[in-house]
C-alpha cells in the first residue's frame, strides 16, 4: 500500500500514455501483465493505428488490435521497445462509496494530470453496464485513462462525464476490462472486435467479412477501416509539413492541429476552419527571472528584421509565431512560411539559451 498519493502519481507518470489520432486526443495506460495499452473505443474510433507518446517511450505509431463499442474499450499494441512502468489492475467489486480515488490522464492535450475525488456510487446502471460514479474531475482528453484507488491499483477506465455536471464522472469497472482481456487473449497474436449485438468477440480474419459470424449483425472489422485522407487546406498543410521531412502521422494532434519537435523547440500548427485562420506557434523557452531587459531588447530588434513571423512573450513563454488566412494561403507560400518558422525557431532557442540564459520549456 502507498503511504502517500504523491507516490501513486509518480508511478503512473511512467505508465499513462497520450494518444493522438487525426480526429481526437485521449489517454491510455500500459498493462505489463497483458502487454497491452488500454484506452476507450471512442478515443481511437475509425483508426487502424494511432500515435502514442509517454515518459517511458518515444513517440511512435502503433496499431489498434481490439475495438469494443459495447464496453467502450480498445487495445493498442505495445511497442517492442519501451520503459513503461508496471501498474496493476485492482478488484473493482471491492470498491465502496466514499473510497478515495485518482483520475489520471492528459486533459486538453496536457502531458500529465491527476485529480483526486471520492466514489459516490458503485452501481450506476446504463445500457446494462454498471459504472463507478465519482467526483474526480474529468476533462476532454481524460478519456481512456485509469481510475486508481489508494493502493495504487486500477479499478476503472475513465469513460464519460455528465455535460455541465459538477465533476460527475463515470468509469468502467476493472472487472469488465479483465474479462475482455481474458477473452481477447484466447487467440495468439489476436486482432478482434466485439459485436454490439451478441457481445461475442470476432477475430480477424472474419470469413463473414461485414457480418458477425455468431448472430449475423453488421460489424466492421479493424481491417476494413479506411486510411485517413485529409482534404482541402488540411491536405495542403500536411503536404507542407511532409516536405520538410517530418512523419505526418507523428505530428497529428486531432483534425486541425499538428505538433513538430525541432531541437528543443516545440512547433504547433493549427487551422481554425470557421474563421479560416492558420496559426503557427513555436514555444522556444521560458522567461528567466533575471536579464529580462536584454531579452526584450533582443525580441524588439529581431521583430524589426523578421518577415511574416513575430517574436514575443506569452505569459512565461518566449514564442515565435505567424498568423495567416486560408484564402491567401497557397501551397508554395505555406511551404516557405512553415519552413521559416521551424528553421528560425531552432536557431533562436539555441541563441536564447546560450546568450541570455533562458529556461528550456519542458512538457
Image: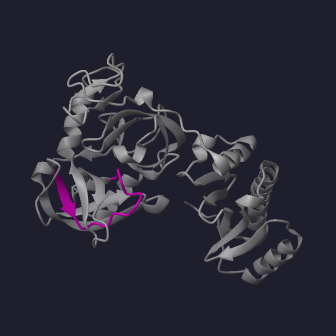
Residue 273, by quadrant, is bottom right
Q: What is the magenta segment's predominant secondary structure?
A: loop
Q: In the image shown, does 74 or 215 lie closer to the viewer?
A: 215
Left or right, residue 31 beside residue 97: right
**Residue 290: x, y in percent?**
69, 81
**Residue 291: x, y in percent?**
73, 80
Q: Quadrant of the N terminus?
A: bottom left
Q: In the image shown, does 304 or 262 lie closer to the viewer?
A: 304
Q: Quadrant of the C terminus?
A: bottom right
Q: Residue at x 77, y 64 (%)?
A: 354
Q: Specify whether residue 44 is painted magenta.
A: no
**Residue 42: x, y in percent?**
37, 47
For the question of whether residue 329 can be seen, the reply is yes
From which residue to which does the magenta span run? 130-145
Q: Residue at x 33, y 63 (%)?
A: 138
**Residue 38: x, y in percent?**
34, 42
Residue 10, by quadrant, is bottom left
Q: Residue at x 34, y 24 (%)?
A: 190
Whether residue 298 is situated above or below residue 230 in the rendered picture: below
Left or right, residue 228 beside residue 304: left
Q: Specify whether residue 140 is painted magenta.
A: yes
Q: Residue at x 26, y 45 (%)?
A: 88
Left or right, residue 134 beside residue 114: left
Please name the colour scheme applied to the rendered image.
Answer: one colour
- Outermost residue toward the right? 305
Whether residue 42 is situated above or below residue 297 in the rendered picture: above
Amino acid at each position: 500500500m502507498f503511504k502517500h498519493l504523491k507516490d501513486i502519481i509518480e508511478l503512473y507518470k511512467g505508465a499513462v500514455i497520450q494518444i493522438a489520432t487525426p480526429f481526437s486526443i485521449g489517454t491510455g495506460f500500459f498493462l505489463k501483465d497483458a502487454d497491452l495499452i488500454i484506452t476507450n473505443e471512442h478515443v481511437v474510433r475509425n483508426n487502424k493505428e494511432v500515435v502514442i507518446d509517454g515518459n517511458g517511450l518515444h513517440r511512435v505509431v502503433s496499431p489498434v488490435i481490439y475495438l469494443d463499442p459495447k464496453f467502450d474499450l480498445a487495445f493498442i499494441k505495445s511497442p517492442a521497445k519501451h520503459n513503461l512502468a508496471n501498474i496493476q489492475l485492482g478488484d473493482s467489486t471491492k470498491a465502496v462509496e466514499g473510497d478515495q480515488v485518482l483520475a489520471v490522464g492528459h486533459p486538453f492535450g496536457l502531458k500529465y494530470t491527476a485529480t483526486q475525488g471520492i466514489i459516490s456510487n458503485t452501481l450506476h446502471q446504463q445500457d446494462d453496464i454498471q459504472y463507478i460514479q465519482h467526483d474526480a474531475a474529468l476533462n476532454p482528453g481524460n478519456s481512456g485513462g485509469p481510475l486508481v484507488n489508494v493502493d495504487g491499483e486500477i479499478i476503472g477506465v475513465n469513460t464519460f462525464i455528465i455535460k455541465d455536471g459538477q465533476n460527475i464522472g463515470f468509469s468502467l469497472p476493472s472487472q469488465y476490462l479483465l474479462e475482455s482481456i481474458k477473452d481477447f487473449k484466447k487467440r495468439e497474436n489476436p486482432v478482434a472486435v466485439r459485436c454490439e449485438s451478441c457481445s461475442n468477440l470476432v477475430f480477424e480474419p472474419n470469413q463473414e467479412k461485414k457480418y458477425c459470424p455468431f448472430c449475423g449483425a453488421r460489424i466492421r472489422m479493424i481491417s476494413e477501416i479506411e486510411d485517413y485522407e485529409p482534404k482541402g487546406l488540411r491536405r495542403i498543410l500536411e503536404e507542407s509539413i511532409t516536405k520538410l521531412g517530418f512523419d505526418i502521422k507523428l505530428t497529428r494532434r486531432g483534425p486541425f492541429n499538428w505538433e513538430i519537435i525541432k531541437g528543443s523547440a516545440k512547433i504547433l500548427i493549427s487551422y481554425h476552419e470557421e474563421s479560416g485562420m492558420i496559426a503557427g506557434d513555436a514555444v522556444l523557452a521560458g522567461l528567466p527571472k533575471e536579464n529580462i531587459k536584454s531579452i526584450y531588447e533582443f525580441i524588439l530588434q529581431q521583430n524589426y528584421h523578421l518577415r511574416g513571423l513575430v517574436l514575443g512573450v506569452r505569459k512565461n513563454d518566449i514564442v515565435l509565431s505567424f498568423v495567416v488566412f486560408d484564402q491567401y494561403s497557397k501551397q508554395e507560400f505555406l511551404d516557405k512560411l512553415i519552413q521559416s518558422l521551424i528553421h528560425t525557431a531552432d536557431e533562436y532557442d539555441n541563441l536564447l539559451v546560450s546568450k541570455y540564459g533562458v529556461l528550456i520549456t519542458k512538457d
